[in-house]
Amino acid sequence: MSMCSSGSTGGNVLLACGSFLVDAPNVVDIFSMNFDNLQEPTKQAQLPHAFPVSCARWLAKGPGFPELLITSSDYLRIWNSRGELQTILQHTDNHKDASAQITSVDVCCDASTGSSAQLASCDSYGLCGFWDVERGVMHTKLDLEQPLCDVGFGPGSLAAVAGNQGDCFLVDRRQPREVGILAPPRHVRAPATAKLAWGLHRPDIFAVAWQGEHAGTAIYNAAYRESPPQLLRHHHRDGVVADLSWSPAFPELLCCAGEHGTVEVFEFSRSTAEAVCAGCVPCLSWEPKDGRENCASLALSREVRQGLHVLVLGTASLKGGSLWITSLPEPSCRRSSAVIRSTSSANDPLLPVEAAAEATVPVASPTQDADVPAASASLVEPVC
């Protein structure tokens, strides 16, 4: 799942949701929605995918530039927001010289200058590639010698890559041959798939959710690479995190969606070892459908009103899938003026999601935890 702002008003967004069906054709649905009135999302386009969609990322340079969607599976495909295919990019420069399963993709561009957008992708053969999107050229390729699960851009020229042997690679694109390897958490056992989250405005730490028999979500310190990763203390200790993301609005907040049906939010106000350790306990939790649906993916908005951002969650059950929308509060440290710089400002009014939707859609009954406040949320529309 991926979200981006659309048009000149902050409430308009585009949302891309991809399917992951092994024995059936797959699709990516593009929805348009407006957080100001929260009417039912409008399906704007449906993109055909023969193979499961491993990742989707919007490339939005800013006002005056068209929004592009990049999806990964057997190829990298670049679409416009109307669902028209623009470009196909292929991974062949690997040790088998064959097209590989592309497991993830991430994008980076300077919206203020409109400079050339950069793209990173990784595959099941161990190739990590960095692309110039406008020229469609992979200008840097690294063979990291193990199947790769996810890749994410960090601040400046940094990027992180997670491999299925439990290794996390740190790459400086200015010196791509000098690859740092961060040790895995002690209890993670290979092989393990992973999801990675790193925000451009959170330069100090990033998160990797290791999935598998010995699962766990680890916080890595990008500045002090010798520091051992800290594990988040999820309330469901044996639960697997299906997706995670830092908030573009408030980079103190990390949101994790567990396969067991619970969303947890963690707050990291500072990057000291003590603050990271203290932040490994969730500050907010929420269970749509009381945990009876599995969380599959999530996306977080920029600040749409002062102190307010929005979470969109995709869930799945035997009856199909649903999209949920809820508003999230600002971090507690902002109310005490201990602020990490926000990535955007609030210009547009927005009703809280649960209030705006109260008259037209059913409201979930979240489970209240003894120690953790639960978010209110509204079911917007079944996806399939």
Image (tube, rainbow, N blue to C red):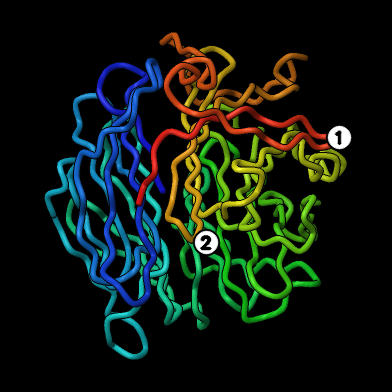
- In this rendered view, identify the residue nearer to me: 110 or 70: 70
Q: Secondary structure at mark 1?
A: loop
Give how far across and how far down residue 237 sits, in percent.
Answer: 79, 59
Q: Amino acid at mark 2?
A: Val
**In the rendered image of this protein, does residue 81 appear above or below residue 261?**
above
Q: Residue at x 34, y 54 (%)?
A: 119
**Depth check: 263 or 82 in front?**
263
At 86% from the left and 35% from the top, the residue drawn is 370
The percent coordinates of residue 297 (x first, y second) are 49, 51
Q: Which mark is residue 142?
A: none
Q: 27 and 138: which one is in front?
A: 27
Q: Secondary structure at mark 2?
A: strand
Identify the amino acid type marked 1.
Answer: Asp
User: Left or right: where does residue 381 sit relative to residue 77?
Assistant: right
| 297 relative position to 109: left or right | right
* Residue 211 % position (x, y): 63, 67
Q: Residues within 10 Å of mark 1 (few under 14, many from 20)?
A: few
- The local crowd at label 2, few if under 14, some if 14 to 19, many if 20 or more residues have their Cα within 10 Å, is many
Label 2 to label 1, Cα distance in Å?
Answer: 39 Å
Please say if 382 is above or below 158: above
Q: Quadrant of residue 368 in the image?
A: top right
Q: Identify the residue at horizontal 27%, vertical 47% (top origin).
A: 69
Q: What residue did someone put label 2 on?
A: 171
Position of residue 370 relative to residue 196, above or below, is: above
Seen in the picture, residue 50 relative to 321 is either above or below; the reply is: below
x and y, in percent, of residue 124 in the image: 43, 78
**Residue pictured at 65% horizontal, 65% vertical:** 210
Query: 69 and 34: which one is in front?
Result: 34
Residues marked 2 and 1 touching at CB (< 8 Å): no
Residue under circle 1? 371
